[in-house]
Image (cartoon, grey):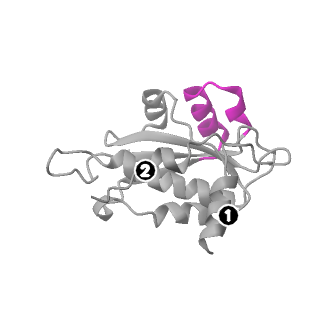
Amino acid sequence: MNINDFLKLAEERYSIRRYANKEVPREVLMSVLESARIAPSAVNFQPWKFYIASGEKAKKMVCESYNRDWIATAPLYIIACGDHSVAWHRSLDNKDHTDIDIAIAVEHICLSAAAAGLGTCWVCNFDAEMLKRDMQLPENLEPIAIIPIGYPEGDGGVRPKKRKTIEEIVQWLED
């Protein structure tokens, strides 16, 4: 893959909010999860655990924590959890890198899913305490993101993205 192939993949990936009634093959899902496993993390501490909600009871828990109709169309969900107790904390100010590490792994999931023809959507606006309780997660794990995953319904056409220009986000420090 060259840089142009990657940029095309990144440009064409967008948040899917309608999924086809089609099962995701386990081997495809496992390849997507492998991309999270190999994601970099601060000091390689890998403070993550990924739960796959594919059964009806588990899917219902996810849908109850994020009460939007569209999410129920996904055939399964990945719940990305972080363990703050094993994450790297910067020594100067004790900054916890759990959320950063999870974000990197989740973006690996989203991009590899797009490469496999699957759709995803980052969901962070959910009731984390409810989901943690319903999933009976151990005290050390925090649900950080829900990733609905499945085949997009419809033509999967790319919607125009509103992004700042490169000049607005990059500043050279040459002095």
Quarter that holds the C terminus:
bottom left
Residue 120, image x, y percentages: 65, 47
Residue in the picture at 67% in, 52% down: 13
Report the front residue among 140 and 127.
127
Report the front residue among 60 and 127.
127
Whether 87 is drawn above or below 124: the answer is below
Describe the element under mark 2 as helix, strand or loop: helix
Quadrant (top left/top right/bottom left/bottom right) for the N terminus: bottom right
Q: Which residue is mark 1?
A: 28
Q: Which residue is mark 2?
A: 102
> Is 86 one of the magenta-colored residues?
no
Q: Position of residue 140 (x, y in %)?
A: 31, 43
Amino acid type, label 1: Val
| Magenta part of the chain | 53-73
Which amino acid does the dot numbered 2 rest on?
Ile
Residue 29 visible in the snapshot? no
Q: Where's residue 133, x and y in %?
A: 43, 31
Q: Is residue 15 left or right of residue 51?
A: right
Residue 84: image quadrant is top left
The mark nearer the N terminus, 2 or 1, is 1
- Is residue 40 shown left or right of residue 54? left
Closer-to-camera residue (71/108): 108
Q: Residue furthest left?
A: 92
Q: Main secondary structure of the magenta part?
A: helix
Residue at (44% x, 39% y) in the render = 143
Q: Nearer the viewer, residue 42 or 2?
A: 2
Above or below, 136 against 68 in this view is below
Numbered badge on residue 20 = none
